[in-house]
Image (cartoon, rainbow, N blue to C red):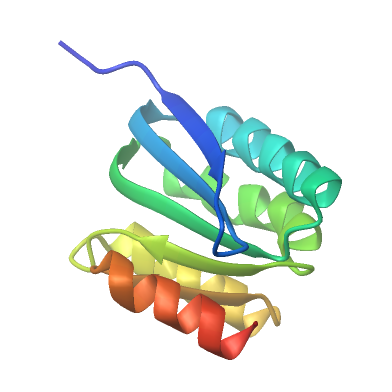
Amino acid sequence: MSIPFRYSTHTNEQHYLSITVEGIADDIHIENMYADIKNIALLSQYKNILVNANNVTLDFPMERFLPLMNRLLPQLVRFNIARLCSLDDYKQDLIQNVCLSSNVNIKNFTNQTDAENWLLKQFP
């Protein structure tokens, strides 16, 4: 049985927007999620975002990956993004590398404390 895609957003006293993502996601799910995140972050005036992607499975073919990233990059470039994810998943590493090559401040982590410290020290 597959877990439906869903995400929740939270703001906190540490001045970053926190997103928890879970389930099976296709490229449209991801694109819509980041559009929502962008709108919430802009309305709340947050530049720092922490995305917990530990419990999401990206389920779409690689030929849709780069077109998705090309659509997302203009939305992401204005933010600093720490991502909690499995470093064993090559797609997660690919997301980080594509973003970094396009000057998006993003970094993958396996530990929430490290991710928070990076966000708050690098981009207070």
Name the spot of residue 108 as percent of width and height, x first. Answer: 38, 71
Name the spot of residue 12 as percent of width and height, x first. Answer: 55, 51
63, above or below 59, in the image: below
Q: Is residue 58 left or right of residue 122?
A: left
In this orientation, which residue lies closer to the viewer: 107 or 45? Answer: 45
Residue at left offset 79%, top offset 68%: 78
Q: Is residue 42 left or right of residue 32?
A: right
Instruction: Using the rendered view, name the quadrant where residue 110 is placed.
Output: bottom left
24, above or below 21, in the image: above
Residue at left offset 38%, top offset 50%: 52
In this orientation, which residue lies closer to the viewer: 45 or 93? Answer: 45
What quarter of the picture does the C terminus occupy? bottom right
What is the total number of numbered labels drawn onto the structure image? Answer: 0
Residue at left offset 48%, top offset 72%: 96
Q: Is residue 4 left or right of residue 15?
A: left
What quarter of the picture does the N terminus occupy? top left
Residue at left offset 32%, top offset 39%: 56
* Outermost residue toward the top in this view: 1
Name the spot of residue 47 as percent of width and height, x first. Answer: 72, 65
Q: Is residue 103 left or right of residue 86?
A: right
Name the spot of residue 87 as percent of width and height, x first. Answer: 23, 68
15, above or below 64, in the image: below
100, above or below 21, in the image: below
* Outermost residue toward the front in this view: 13
